[in-house]
Amino acid sequence: RQADFVLHIACGSNRFLPTSDRSAALMQSLRRSASKAAVRAARSASATPAAKRGMASGKELIFGNEARAKLLTGVDRLAETVKVTLGPKGRNVILDQTYGAPRITKDGVSVAKEIEFKDRATNLGAQLVRSVASKTNDVAGDGTTTATILTRSIFREGCKAVAAGMNPTDVRRGIEMSVKAVVDELESMATKVEGTKSIAQVATISANGDQDVGNLLAEAMEKVTKDGVITIQDGKTLNDELECVEGMKFDRGYISPYFVNDAKTQKCEFEDAMVLLVEGKVSSFQQVFQLLDHCAKMSKPLIVIAEDVESEALAGFIVNKLRGGLKVVCVKAPGFGDNRKASLQDMAILTGAQLVSDDLGLKLDKVEPSMLGSVKKCVVGKDDTVLLDGAGSSEAIQERITQIRATIEAATSEYEKEKLQERLAKLAGGVAVVKVGGSSEVEVGERKDRFVDALNATRAAVEEGIVPGGGVALLRAAKVLDSIAESSKNQDMKVGVNIVRQACQEPCFLIAQNAGSHGAVIVQKVQEAGGNTGYDAYNDKMVDMIDAGIIDPVKVVRTGLQDAASVATMLTTTEAMVVQLPEEKPAADAGMGGMR
């Protein structure tokens, strides 16, 4: 009966036919239905393209000499771009920016950071050399171009040695031994920087021979002393300007980024601001409401420097800042324990404020507006704060400085002496602001890069001393490698020693080449001359480098060589490389290409 019922439904109008005829009618009806379904499916497929299943891209494995060759290609191309900036007659590099005008610079690390290759294997080599330049810049602040070309030289010769069948581990040991010996020799050659003239010479060489830069930075360092803080800013005139202001800088920034009022620099800047100093924590917004109300009525910003600002109080500050337009910023006090307390007392003397402390029996909710200090200007960044031109009396500041110096002499712990020296620098040094001038934004940016390099080189020179510049120091220090080569255990280690010896010639070679001279000839002349005699590329003659003021900070030369050798030896001992294959994207549909 069930079968007859199905047939009855399927046959429709043929339900009165005999059973055999009903079966034939059913089959014919099913065929028609299947045909209609197929047509509908075809139409749907033509209207909507079928979705393709995406396949994950795999990894490519590259081994041996082929892997090193790809790495060397990236290192070579980056070094070729960076090397043109070396020396007093080095050229500029123009960088395309994702937004804004193109940037023109002679700063090696800025050029290196912009270089990226489409081929992933080649880009690995460039990334590693970029890390050398960045690390040298972080530690020494200058010498990034030298570090880059040293890395290229050591890695290039290392690749040749390994391809010739040398043991890469022994070659690496020879390089490391040689670098240590050269660094020790550089430190023994160093002489201390004394006087404004020496500082100006260091800054001039670092700024690619620009004497105006050297003289201005020497003047700034003389005014604020080596313990002071020097900052470089964009100027608004055609000429460079120097402003020196008594102030304090410490390594703590704003607690929350909501306090930022300058989106471009990501800093909070206030002028003529009141200062509240709290030794403990600010736990409730109600505790400081009266002070905020007073500042709002006087239309003055408020800087709160405390051990911490807890969530409830912080939320109150932020909400009032965002909704009510209240000018306020909260900063954590620098240091820990007794050192924090002493630093807050220093700030109180500098700003003319009364420190809110339980030790003095003073509670936060009892503070009166007269207990607030004031500063002419404050700049609060993510990691540091600068307080400029505090309202404290100069007699009180001088008395505090004398007290700290007496404490330093009586201190026995090296750690305690170091912290006291930091406090003394913040109080006694002050802040010098160099405003870089120029006729266009591009020119100001290029000159600012040179000022920053020169400032970092000057600080490095004051810290560790100076040696003859122009690549002469490395050539002289490389003489100690003769004894290292003789004491090497095997031939492969001797090859490593010779690699470093050849790398030490590279800076002098390229400085001469960029000046239009024959590099190999100049290197030979400098080696034969001995002493401090070297090649003055700016005037195209052989001179005494120290007398001519062509000098380099030891820290810059040392850091560049050590960082270059570290990465180059790692690259030399690389035997396999794993890189991501490029993702295969399906071809786009032609669509209606005939229409325009």
Image (cartoon, rainbow, N blue to C red):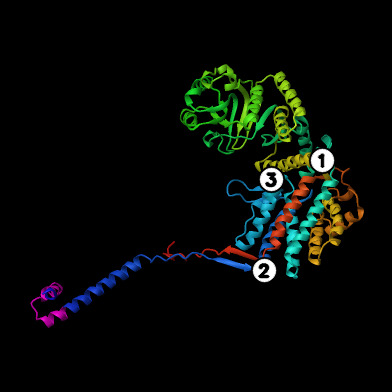
Q: Is residue 555 above or below residue 225?
A: below
Q: Which quarter of the rendering shows the N terminus? A: bottom left
Which marked residue is nearer to the observer: mark 1 or mark 2? 2
Classify residue 518 by image quadrant: bottom right
> Measuring 59% from the left and 45% from the top, which residue is drawn there?
100
Q: Is residue 589 above or below residue 241?
A: below
Q: Is residue 494 above or below residue 410?
A: below
Which residue does the numbered mark 3 point to in the structure image? Answer: 138
Residue 318, position in %: x, y? 49, 31
Residue 336, position in %: x, y? 62, 32
Marks 1 and 2, the one that precedes in the sequence: 2
* Type of amino acid at the residue the image marks with label 1: Gln
Which residue does the numbered mark 1 point to in the structure image? Answer: 201
Find residue 64 and name its label: 2
Residue 229, position in %: x, y? 71, 33
* Type of amino acid at the residue the image marks with label 2: Gly
